[in-house]
Amino acid sequence: MDRRQLLGLGLSKLWLTAFGAAGLALAGPAGPGSALAAERVVERRPGRKPAGGTPPRSRLVMLDPGHGGNDPGAIGTRGTFEKEVTLDIAQDVARILADRHGVAVKLTRRDDRFLALDDRVALTRDAGADLFVSIHADSAPNSDARGLSAYILSEKASDSFASRLAQQENRADRFGRPGSVGGGRIVKDILMDLTARHTRHASLAARQILVEGAGKELRLLDNPMRAANFAVLKAPDVPSVLVETGFLSNPRDEEILRDATARRVVSRVLAREIAGVLSSPAFA
């Protein structure tokens, strides 16, 4: 049973516990906002394995190029825009995943546009993605920090470095149109609790595989596996990882990320390791 089926089952059990069978009978047909409707949406998410032994579909990865539009993200000392670096890398990773690894890929954005953090999460959940990877090249809390690192969701940050990065990223919605910022919680706490254990386990596995594999070819940040309260990682039923490909606040990292050939190496490594994540036992 996958995470979304578990979520639907949990919802129905919660309603039975709260109201009893009579309460459900009184509720009448399930409307679009009811718990039963939510369960049906979960069960009908595209591409899930139907009964009868039909082979499962290709895994779907949602790549999220950080920032965009009037949100440039970090700006390096040589004028490098994070939003341009992340889009270029994400597009190349998508191409390699599809061409070399047979992985289905979607991007939250394919051009220079602004997307609120909630919208990125919603797009991922609506697509029924198996893995969400948000790609960044931020400014670090100190200019000496450089190298690739990966982050998963945690209400309590693993350290002050990760905490400051999360605070910085979570302010991205300030670039949205008035009235479009802060769409509210994607799900209520009770729904997150139903699948959090499964999602966190897979997110932990994804972070470890990505970092250990990338470290064979790319420079890593000191303590490259961290956690913090990143808003963009809050899909309760999709394992999610934020990857910092480097830091534009560091002159050497900026030099690498400005270079198209060097970015191709980063893309190839990320694509290879993402494919490895999807074939790991945590995603079986």
Image (cartoon, grey):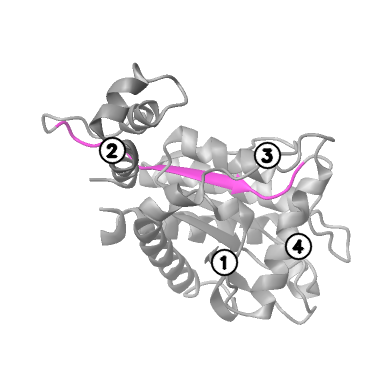
Side of 73 where 51 appears, left or right: left
Q: Left or right: 115 with respect to 219?
A: right
Q: Of discs 4 and 3, which sits in the foreground?
A: 3
Precedes in sequence: disc 4 or disc 3:
4
Disc 3 marks which residue?
183
Mark 1: few/some/many CA within 10 Å (<14, 14-19, 20+): few
Q: Quadrant of the N terminus?
A: top left
Residue beneath label 1, please?
155
* Mark 1–mark 3 distance (CA, rounded to whole Å): 19 Å
N-term mark: 2 or 4 = 2
Tell me where residue 53 sits by quadrant. top left
Instruction: Assess disc 2: are there few (<14), some (14-19) or many (≥20) residues with their C-alpha within 10 Å of its C-alpha.
Output: some
Choose the circle earlier in sequence order: 3 or 2. 2
Residue at 55% over, 38% down: 122
| Labelled disc at residue 168 | 4
Cα distance between the residues tagged 4 and 3: 18 Å
Asked if the stretch drawn in magenta spans residue 56, the answer is yes
